[in-house]
Amino acid sequence: MQTQSPRSRKRLLKLKLNGRWREDAVAENQLLVDYLRDVAGLTGVKTGCDGGECGACTVLVDGEAVPSCITLAARCHEQSVETIEGLIQQGRPNRLQRSFHEKLGAQCGFCTPGMIMAAEALLRRNPHPNDGEIRLALSGNLCRCTGYIKIIESVRTAAETPA
């Protein structure tokens, strides 16, 4: 005899997404990455490994870099969530986005949003990191295209640029 899988219950999620409060009904088991991409339409958040190991899905939750593929959306209730799209300032890329472009820190671009969000968390808590601190902050983010030299150089350049 087959048993029916229990339906996922829904709950109201209220969060501040890229500076704006919003409310949505979400399944209790919905992952933050799926909420951001499918409900909020923020496709800058990438799904890579689905296990919290590659960093492509990194977003900021209350200013901390978090892998959204292993974070339940419901756990972000009444918290601030920031994605790569939220870093745009008055229609222009922020200093990290500019430096990744100018210093060629983005190769294929798949890992770039997660790298930038991890670097943003670093620069907020440490505006002038050394290369070792940059490497540590990005240690949860994988890139298949580079040897990380251009990525580290991009973060260093952003740190030297006025915010």
Image (tube, grey):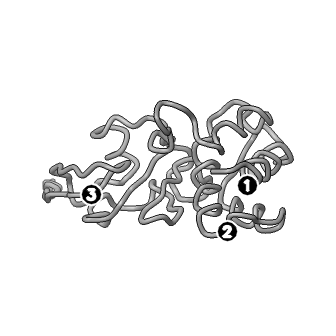
Residue 126: which numbered mark, if any?
A: 2
Q: At 48% from the left edge and 30% from the top edge, which residue is drawn?
A: 91
Residue type beneath disc 2: Asn
Q: How many marks?
A: 3
* Mark 2, other Cα within 10 Å: few <14 / some 14–19 / many ≥20: few
Tell me the SS state at disc 1. Answer: helix
Label 3 – label 1 distance at C-alpha: 29 Å
Residue type beneath disc 3: Leu
Marked residue nearer the N-terminal end (3 or 2): 3
Report if the CB atoms under discs 2 and 1 are less than 8 Å apart. no
Give the camera-side residue of 43 and 128: 128
Q: At 58% from the left edge and 48% from the top edge, which residue is drawn?
A: 114
Q: At 36% from the left edge and 60% from the top edge, which residue is drawn?
A: 80
Q: Position of residue 138 (x, y in %)?
A: 70, 59
Residue 149: which numbered mark, if any?
A: none
Q: Position of residue 2 (x, y in %)?
A: 15, 53
Residue 15: which numbered mark, if any?
A: 3
For the N terminus, the image quarter is bottom left
Tell me the SS state at disc 2. Answer: loop
Q: Quadrant of residue 113?
A: top right
Report if the CB atoms under discs 3 and 1 are less than 8 Å apart. no
Marked residue nearer the N-terminal end (2 or 1): 2
Residue type beneath disc 1: Ala
Q: Which residue is mark 1?
A: 159
* Mark 3, other Cα within 10 Å: few <14 / some 14–19 / many ≥20: many
Q: Position of residue 84 (x, y in %)?
A: 51, 43
**Left-right relation of 84 to 100:** left
Please determine whether, in this image, residue 133 is positioned above or below residue 152. below
